[in-house]
């Protein structure tokens, strides 16, 4: 064995499904994190790295007999690089219906440049 | 020199590979065939159905109980804007869950919390296990 498995017995670490959308006012990052409590969600922004970490809890009890299990409790983990275009001081986030929405506003100094086409 | 053609010749190597694969982060990008994923369980008094529906508001989900089938359907709307990356599922979905025990239909409760739908279907009282007291004669 090359490596001692230090994650054995721990819940699997998964990368949540992510949508990255651009609108006029900035960028929006949507992360599917069902089963997470808002208070237990860690969202850090350090330098250019944005990281999200949370554990899901579905209220599964050991007394239940399981018939079909298509999901289990996991640890969500994702890391993103934040672009230069983003104003990092104004980044905000909300958690609703199991989806974490991170709003990354565009920096004011770099307004979209419009190039005028002159008719010759 | 003896060449080993046995099926398990490569086994130690395969086993090491499996163990190493196990604790890498699991990519969830491989889209599951069925949506939403379900977790079905029961105890002595109820059947529990859990479904993962991140992004669905309560009015987006419809839950119908027919004879012995629970129908879960709805639609996930895409967000507005220009997509640079899309991994989250959108569109309409439907799943049928066959319940093989008689259900007390008026007692069904469904709750939604942080993207998880939780349906509790109480079993008919006739189906619940009952202790029979043995009386001395």
Image: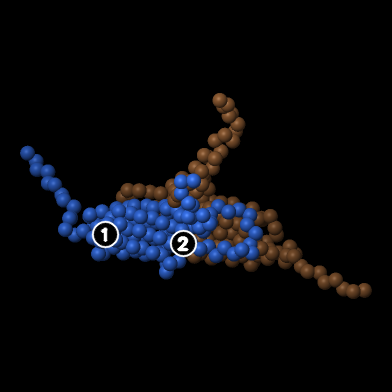
Q: Residue at x 32, y 58 (%)?
A: A50
Query: Gap between marks 1 and 2, in whole Å?
Result: 24 Å
Q: Position of residue A56 (x, y in %)?
A: 48, 61
Q: Residue at x 35, y 58 (%)?
A: A51
Q: How many marks?
A: 2
Most foreground residue, B127 or A60: A60
The residue wearing badge 1 is A47
Can I make out residue B81 in this image? no
Q: Which chain is depicted blue?
A: A
Give the secondary structure at mark 2: strand
Q: Chain of mark 1?
A: A
The residue wearing badge 2 is A55
Q: Position of residue B121 (x, y in %)?
A: 63, 63
Q: Position of residue A29 (x, y in %)?
A: 34, 56
Give the secondary structure at mark 1: loop
Q: Which chain is depicted brown?
A: B
């Amino acid at each position: 064995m090359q490596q001692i498995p230090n994650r054995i017995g721990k819940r699997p670490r998964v990368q949540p499904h992510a949508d990255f959308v651009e609108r006029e006012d900035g960028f929006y990052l949507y992360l599917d994190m069902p089963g997470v409590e808002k208070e237990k969600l860690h969202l850090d922004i350090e330098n250019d790295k944005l990281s999200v970490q949370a554990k899901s809890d579905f209220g599964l009890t050991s007394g239940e007999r399981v018939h079909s299990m298509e999901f289990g409790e996991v640890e969500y983990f994702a890391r993103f690089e934040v672009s230069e275009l983003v104003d990092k001081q104004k980044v905000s986030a909300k958690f609703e219906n199991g989806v974490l929405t991170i709003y990354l506003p565009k920096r004011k100094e770099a307004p979209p440049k419009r190039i005028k086409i002159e008719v010759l | 020199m003896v060449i080993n053609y046995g099926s398990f010749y490569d086994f130690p190597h395969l086993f090491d590979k499996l163990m190493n694969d196990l604790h890498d982060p699991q990519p969830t990008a491989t889209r599951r065939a069925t949506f939403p994923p379900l977790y079905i369980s029961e105890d002595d008094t109820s059947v529990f159905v859990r479904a993962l529906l991140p992004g669905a508001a309560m009015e987006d989900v419809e839950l119908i109980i027919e004879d012995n089938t629970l129908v879960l359907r709805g639609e996930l709307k895409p967000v507005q804007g220009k997509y640079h990356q899309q991994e989250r599922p959108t569109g309409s979905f439907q799943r049928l869950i066959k319940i093989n025990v008689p259900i007390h239909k008026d007692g069904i409760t469904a709750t939604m919390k942080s993207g998880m739908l939780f349906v509790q279907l109480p079993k008919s009282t006739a189906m619940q296990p009952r202790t029979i007291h043995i009386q001395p004669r």
